Amino acid sequence: MDKQFEEWHTEIMQQIHAAQTLSELQSLRSHWLGRRGIITLAMKGLSSLSIEERRSQGQQLNALRETVLDLLTSRQQEMEMAEETTQLQREQFDMTLPGSWPQTGLLHPITRTRRFIEDVFLRMGFSLEYGPEIEHEWYNFEALNMPANHPARDMQDSFFINVPGMVLRTHTSPVQIRAMKKYQGRLPVRIIAPGRAFRRDDDATHVPMFFQVEGLVIDHGITLADLKGTLTTMAQELLGTDIRTRFRPSYFPFTEPSVEMDVTCASCGGTGCRVCKGTGWVEILGSGMVHPVVLTNGGYDPSQVSGFAFGLGIERLAMRIFGIDDLRLLYQNDMQFLSQFQSYIGRPIL
């Protein structure tokens, strides 16, 4: 072997043996075999030699290169194995250490309340219907007897999007029209429509994004007595037979006559507090007999059939069931707050 190559071989052996870390080994690899390494540049310089010298030195350089690669690879494997052994010795498993319990998940109080409501109405013969959250203004307003520039729209501050005629639905009531269109005049209609709605409200009993359950019944001879009986049964199933309720006259453009249903405030038990604004009552839903215009827009003849509808706020009902005094707490994702309802057994939550 050429004397220069023998010196390189000896030097490489010494350097690889002296290397103590993988980073030092990588530096040696770059120094000798990298793009500008000593052996690499020597191989590039073979082109300036004669054919005989090129053949002789080329064979020696290739042999040296292969030897260096083998030495580097072997030394790297030794270092990695030694490092792994050291780490295993340092991280021995201690059987005496106490174990850790995995954190148990749970359904959000709003989801649990929604499932409870659905169970109650499904047992009463209702079916589930759903509608889009980005709704056309015709379904959200016009079809529900709220034409453009109608003052009733001021009651529902809306989030509009950059698509003409489309809005984040302000209530789940548009599902009434979609359900009537789906049934195409068939009777009876008994549906509930759970889902999200959006309004620019934010206080102890209102949030910009909230959940509702819309209810609709259409058939021959439906009266306000059917509405009151259904909602009273629902309240007793959800809140207990000792719950106090009251119905107050109200106004909704899509029902006539219209009533609001209140239940005893969960925070003060009816004595008056900031949640119920000192009245002792908290409104949980609005309802009434379906307006003839709405029936007509849905494809039904108001002279032949009648119906009632209601919109139930799930958050307010969850506040009543779980004893929460501020609706906004439900949306702060505070696990310490939410976890207190994990073992809740006051009512049979599904």
Image (tube, rainbow, N blue to C red):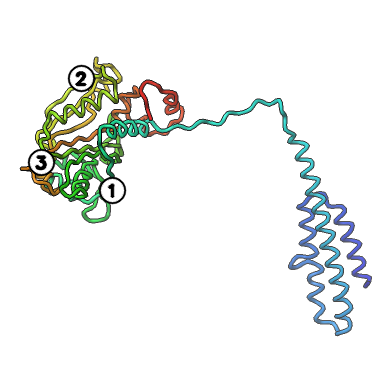
Spot occupied by residue 57 in the image (x, y as percentages of width and height): 88, 76
Q: Nearer the viewer, residue 59 or 297?
A: 297
Spot occupied by residue 105 in the image (x, y as percentages of width and height): 48, 32
Q: Is 32 positioned to the left or the right of 148 in the image?
A: right
Q: Nearer the viewer, residue 349 or 24?
A: 349
Mark 2 closeness class: few <14, some 14–19, many ≥20 residues within 10 Å: some
- Residue at numbered disc 2: 279
What amino acid type is highlighted by mark number 3? Answer: Val
Dot 1 and dot 3 residues touching (CB under 8 Å) = no
Q: Which image quarter holds the C terminus?
A: top left
What amino acid type is highlighted by mark number 2? Answer: Thr
Vertical position of residue 11 compared to residue 102: above or below: below
- Residue at numbered disc 3: 305
Which badge, 3 or 2, comes first in the chain's sequence? 2
Vertical position of residue 332 compared to residue 43: above or below: above
- Numbered tag placed on residue 132 in the rendering: 1
Q: Secondary structure at mark 1?
A: loop
- In the displayed image of the protein, which residue is found farthest to the top? 271
Dot 2 and dot 1 residues touching (CB under 8 Å) = no
Q: Nearer the viewer, residue 179 or 263?
A: 179
Image-quadrant location for residue 107? top left
Which badge, 2 or 1, comes first in the chain's sequence? 1
CA gap between label 2 and label 1 equals: 36 Å
Image-quadrant location for residue 12? bottom right
> Which residue is depicted at the point 10% across and 35% down?
221
